[in-house]
Image (spheres, rainbow, N blue to C red):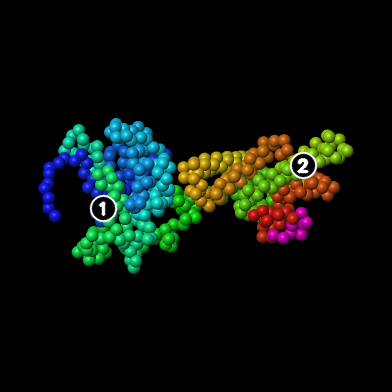
Amino acid sequence: MTGTHSVITPAIMYWGTPVALITTCNEDATANIGPISSVWWLGHRCLLGLASGSQTTINIFRTKECVINLPSADMAHYINPIAKTTGTLTVPPGKKDRGYTHCKDKFAASGLTQQCSDLVQPPRISECPVQMEAEVTNSMDLMQDVPDRKGMLIAIEVKILRTHVRNDLRMAGFENRIDPDRWRPLIMSFQEFYGLAPEKVAESSLGTIDEERYRVITRSDVVKQGGDMDTFDTMDTDICPDGDTRTEREMVVKLIVAHFTAIVAFCNWQSLRNEKLDTIEPILFLLSPLIVLAQTALGVIIINLSFVYDVALSPKSFSHHLETYARRWNTLFGKKPSPPWRTPTGSRQSRFGSAWIRLGRATAIFATLFQFAATIFLYQRRKNLHGWDALTVLDHRTFELSVGGAAVSLLSLALILELPGFGQMPETIYIPEYKPDPAVIFCRGDSRRCPSWYQILYASDIGSATSAATWLAL
């Protein structure tokens, strides 16, 4: 078909290219989305056309990485809310003239959700059928022949590191091919959204060439990358949920540190109470660090209820009730009496050795308190940025350990400062006439209930009851 041609000078030349949503990381670790349509590929390289002052460009040059997310033709409703927004705090004059406004959280504005990436920090967009993790390899200023326009627009070359595709787009019988009959990208043509025709308009002679023959150009390995429904060793949805950009190594290291600091804090607390450590108590604490809080809270409740009961019903004097209350409080929190015989202490007898012990105790206390504060801050920040779904089982376990470690460190600090109620445990705590006392001993988690760490059943009635209750609490 032929027709008459005219000479025109269009202001834009968007002849029809796919829409791409470029995700990058801001300086405060939040994610930004940059909708663009100046994008094309050759081999495993992609060229992005961007304005030099856009937040996407700023983030890419700072971090050297991004994710290219390709929406399908039915996703225009996600893009329109953020199409005329910018992540830069100050809207550039040119964009302001075209009606752009600042938007800090484009995920919230668009309704899109984050999905953790494998190799780069910026998240993928869960709703996009195609997601490509990429790193910057080169860039070039456009319009270098126009001095007053040079650098306004930039072409950025990125290398595709990993490609994620929705499983229904994969060609049957091939591990690394896309079925073009199923892929319907969203196309931008002169600022309007379009989609591809539902079928091929004609057979292509290039379609007879095996795609693998082009791999010599890309120098990419034939590797099954693993999709969201494939078995893939380096990804675990429980460890790395949607919205997470951390690596498994980082999360596991934090968990190991939390375990270590918590058990050091617990052992410090037990030694201040003159409790032996050849028991199951440290193991119970590692399995369930909040058991200390639970047992202690139960003990405080028992002590206070017993005090109210005694004052209301017992004919004894109020001063006697106060003495009983103080004795029970010291039973729960105080130090056990030192044994009547002397025990060898070695280098701890020296002033230098004692100083090292005090330094170690102080370090353990302040380390766990600092870890608790840092964990709370990071926990709250991640929840606010990405929601509860971004908190993993490792996050919850780290939080639990930090709370347990901080709790025993506060108890240790009270013992060191010899605060009221944290003095020496009375000698008469095991006399049966004081009925609430066995319950207080239970809540204390007395190590006598376990002569050695591998024994779970004990001969003592108190020990058996305490052990059973603790295991049930786990």
128 part of magenta stretch: no
- Relative to residue 84, is residue 284 depicted above or below? below
Q: Which residues are magenta?
A: 456-464
Q: Would residue 63 be seen by someone viewing this image from the given angle?
A: no
Amino acid identity at mark 2: Leu
Residue 183, given in percent of the width and then of the height, sits at: 32, 57
Which residue was labeled with disc 2? Answer: 305
First-in-chain label (1 vs 2): 1
Residue 346, given in percent of the width and then of the height, sits at: 65, 47
Residue at the far bottom: name it: 173
Q: How many numbered tags mark residues here? A: 2
Which residue was labeled with disc 1? Answer: 41
Assign the C terminus to one quadrant of the image. Answer: bottom right
Residue that appears at 22% across and 66% down = 208
Question: How many angstroms separate mark 1 from mark 2 (CA)?
Answer: 74 Å
Residue closest to the eye, 422 or 377:
377
Residue that appears at 21% across and 37% down = 150
Assign the N terminus to one quadrant of the image. Answer: bottom left
Q: Which of the two discs, 1 and 2, sits closer to the camera?
A: 1
Residue that appears at 69% across and 59% down = 456
Q: Would residue 168 be seen by someone viewing this image from the given angle?
A: yes
Q: Are marks 1 and 2 in contact (CB under 8 Å)?
A: no
